[in-house]
Image (spheres, grey):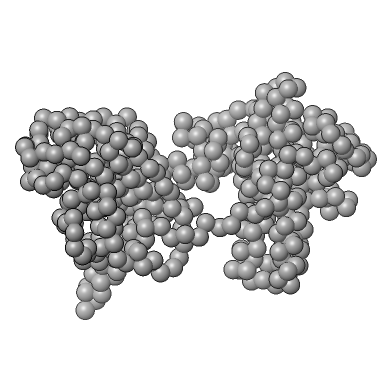
Amino acid sequence: MITTGGEISSILIDQVADWLKKVAISGEPLEVIIQGFCERIAASGVPVARIQLSFSMLHPLYDALSFTWHRGAGVEIEGHSKKNGLPPERFLQSPYFHIISNNLQHFRRRIEPTGPVEFPIFEELRAEGMTDYLAFTHSFGSERQGMIGSWTTDSPNGFSESALGALLRIQSNLAVAAKMAVLNKLADNMLTTYLGGDAGRRVLNGQVKRGDGDTIRAAVVMADMRGSTRLAETLGREGYIETLNQFFDAIAAPFNRNGGQILSFLGDGFLAVYPCERHRAPSEIACRAALSSSFTAVSRMAKLNEDRHSRGLDSIGYGIGLHVGNVMFGNVGLSDRLTFSAFGSAVNEAQRLQTLTKKYPHTTIASSEFADYCGGAWATIGREQLPGVSQKLTIMYPELSDAVGIADEGILEENYDRTSHAEQVMLLHREKTQRGALGEEAKKLQ
């Protein structure tokens, strides 16, 4: 417990503010800023024992990011997935719900050692010895981005006027630094989600001109759904999109791990690469990783189709082509509309190998070059003249009995379906902002 009844040093608070400016300008990640800020504000003499901060994050996969700091224990970080639905009862009984519902900027309550509590969270804070609580909201100037949080102390006298002044003063500095970090995170999130990890980093690092890129060696994977046209016609838009996403969850996810990168989704198929050095040992590692992922994908597709059969649905067919070679990795397109992907003969040949799964009764077909790097049990199909390729390729398929090292044995991850406290805060804040905007438009029409 920290006790303080004196004035908080404005000089030390200024030092924290200066530090926030420096890390904002230098582009430090949000996690570093929050961790460093919490430790510094406590070290400056402000008697905070717990700090909770939540940020809305425009992201295709999750909606909010929360940080909870306890003195002496550091920061816990949690990302929260998207989910449509009603807020949980706990959230409806929270100070955050109260502060947003009533359009408040701040909300303070003393936490008494005995007696009834206004909100369930105060019962937990009281058990931790907390005595005073101050919640706040801070918009980032966008209906989809903002910060909400709370300061809590275990000082016997609660927050002094000096401590409250320091917190309110530093809050704006924190918001500026956090907003810059959130925007940086947003750019990284979007590029990583839409381009892939390595491609996204390359673009962020300046490979943004048409023609920018490299020639790399990689194991190449092409996969595609079978019968997609029929499914699209019979299922309708929503049903087909849901089926397509289930297909990708099953077959594509394994190729986005262990060195693999999905570069693009091409209609109902995708392209993935496993970059490697131009030597045999790295090529073996890349090809074996791609093969292991293909075994996992086959197992997961079997699980998906088993589930579909149990619901009276048809199986989803598919094909996987595996190859290895040099690929061009970079930007192509128009000067003002580019895509970042892999190109070249190795990619074209992988695509044609995948197409051969329609001709032969095998879901996975590889070139003999790929199989040679992998080792293990392979069966030769024969030699094929691929369109656009001058020489015939020996094509092979892997013996599934040799499918060792399957990472998840066909288990499909359940969708993350929990609506978090932080996410509900941001969803409510967004809905309230949108309602306010609609109200203003309605007034103009009256």
Measured as percent of width and height from the top left, residue 284 is found at 75, 28
The residue lying at 71 percent from left, 48 percent from top is 409
Quarter of the picture holding the N terminus: top left
Foreground of the two, 422 or 75: 75
The residue lying at 64 percent from left, 66 percent from top is 240
Q: Quadrant of residue 350?
A: top right
Say left or right for 284 vs 155.
right
Q: Residue 225: x percent and y percent?
A: 73, 56
List the single residue furthest toward the bottom. 446
Relative side of 204 to 360, left or right = left
- What's the residue at 40%, 69% (across, down)? 86
Residue at (9% x, 45% y) in the render: 160
177 relative position to 166: left or right: right
Question: Where 284 sits versus 83, above or below?
Answer: above
Q: Tell me how many marks there are.
A: 0
- Kindly indicate the quadrant of the structure image that contains residue 307: bottom right
Q: Residue furthest front?
A: 114
Image quarter hosting the C terminus: bottom left
Left or right: 209 in relation to 234: left
Residue 435 visible in the snapshot: yes
Please state the horizontal and vertical placement of residue 196, each as a whole percent of the image: 56, 41
